[in-house]
Image (cartoon, rainbow, N blue to C red):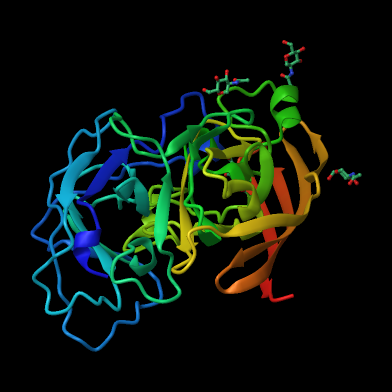
Amino acid sequence: MAPSLLPSLLLILTFLPPLLAATNLRTVATLFRSHPISEPAGAVPPTTYFEVTKPIQLPKTQPCSYLVLQHDFASTYGKPPVLASYQPPSDCPSQNFAKIVLEWTATSKGRQYDRIFGVWIGGVEILRSCTAEPRATGIVWTVKKDITSDITFGKLDNEADLILPISRNLPLNDGLWFEIENSTDIQGKEIKIPQNAYRAVLEVYVSFHENDEFWFGNYPNEYISVNNLTGFPGNGPFREVVVSLDDVVIGAIWPFTVIYTGGVNPLLWRPISGIGSFDLPTYDIEVTPFLGRILDQKGHKFAFRVTNALNVWYIDANLHLWLDKKWERTQGKVLKHRTSPLALSLLSNFSGFDGSFVVKASRSIVSSGWVRSSHGVIITKSQQKLKYGNAMILGNDSNLQKLDQIIKLKESVHFKIP
Ligand SMILES: *[C@@H]1O[C@H](CO)[C@@H](O)[C@H](O)[C@H]1NC(C)=O
Ligand SMILES: *[C@@H]1O[C@H](CO)[C@@H](O)[C@H](O)[C@H]1NC(C)=O
Ligand SMILES: *[C@@H]1O[C@H](CO)[C@@H](O)[C@H](O)[C@H]1NC(C)=O
Ligand SMILES: *[C@@H]1O[C@H](CO)[C@@H](O)[C@H](O)[C@H]1NC(C)=O
């Protein structure tokens, strides 16, 4: 595809505070909070920080690189995102890009908290990340992400033709993500999709902060109230992001426990940062079985809530759509949609500050539907089976916390021609 098909794009970067300082904390919570660290400066070169990831497979051709933005970020709280206008580079030897890699490099020095940030292109999020906490002598780090499937020019066969953002619109003194503040808060956006879509996948970005930064270690509410604790985040250690389409649950996300670079003890994350901290995982929800409900040129609402949420969760999503090259309209119908209600249990046994807690949860979502396109009639069946267990031991007058959490996830998407 020629780059002229793409309107000018914005690359948007924003930084936000990941946490509020909480007062009146006991030792456990204090240990868990993010701390900035400081140390004396010397004539030492900056340290290179990194997250351990699989290397990106690159073609053996000469890459064509393009600088999108260079900026010095300072006090960014409550400020609008930094904008850069972006045109796909026209002077590359070829416009058939086999791979598109976003490369983010930053340096920082002194004393600073970790910050959550996002990068969006035309409202479509392409990176959610956390900055590293610097040393007095300075640090440098690079995040590389394969964004080939997030950009619809130079498209490969298996990639979507159109990506619609489910994120907030500018102007904003914030990121484009939705903020979910509590368990009843529902945020989302109504969109219209082209009438000739034959496949749809929602890619969801999720990060948790402040009172839910360590949701997997949050105390059960009864423990907090019986012990008259204040300043402790509660609601127990289970969270799920529930994705709905027109108020009907279509998918659940039981997120990975990313620990940001200031989490627990910042000394653990230098120079190797935690899994997912520089490139937060995203979660895919297969929307194809529901296409029959949304191919009508009317607005339909994709929305998110978080079971047991405390302030604050940052969530947005990209709807990847595959469009029929031959037909102006496709058709579809939902065949089956079964959502088991969330089964959630808590067993607690405590006396004073010491005790043990076992939280278990399970849920399943099964959906199927057919879509008729120029490829024929295809039935898509999507299944999610989720199981969760969290065993928490609090001892030594709550100066000791032991956690053992396991999430088992069985997901499948099958296509079949009847
Ligand atoms: C939950 O958050 C929403 C959005 O900020 C707010 O309107 C609502 O009052 C909150 N509900 C509770 C129970 O705090
Ligand atoms: C909690 O507060 C209540 C009411 O003030 C009091 O009766 C109770 O003894 C307190 N419990 C503890 C563990 O301090
Ligand atoms: C509760 O904890 C106490 C102290 O560890 C233990 O003796 C008791 O057997 C536990 N009760 C149950 C039902 O697990
Ligand atoms: C229990 O707490 C005391 C005082 O806070 C501490 O010295 C000790 O190491 C703790 N023991 C364990 C097993 O954490």
- Please tell me which residue is depicted at 36% across the width and 39% down the height of the picture: 176
- Please tell me which residue is depicted at 34% across the width and 69% down the height of the picture: 148
- Please tell me which residue is depicted at 66% across the width and 70% down the height of the picture: 377
Residue 335 image point, x, y percent: 77, 57
Residue 276 image point, x, y percent: 44, 60
Residue in the foreground of this view, choosing between 374 and 393: 374
Quadrant of the image for the C terminus? bottom right
- Please tell me which residue is depicted at 41% across the width and 55% down the height of the picture: 163
Task: Say whether residue 384 is left or right of residue 201.
Answer: right
Residue in the foreground of this view, choosing between 322 and 203: 322
Quarter of the rendered image showing ligand 2 = top right
Dividing the picture into quadrants, the one containing residue 111 is top left
In this view of the protein, can residue 109 be seen by the observer? no
Dividing the picture into quadrants, the one containing residue 248 is top right
Task: Say whether residue 275 is left or right of residue 242.
Answer: left
Q: How many marks?
A: 0
Quadrant of the image for the N terminus? bottom left
Residue 363 image point, x, y percent: 77, 52
Residue in the foreground of this view, choosing between 161 and 315: 161
Residue 257 image point, x, y percent: 55, 54
Residue in the foreground of this view, choosing between 19 and 171: 171
In this view of the protein, can residue 193 be seen by the observer? yes
Q: Is residue 154 above or below residue 125?
A: below
Q: Is residue 21 above or below residue 274?
A: above
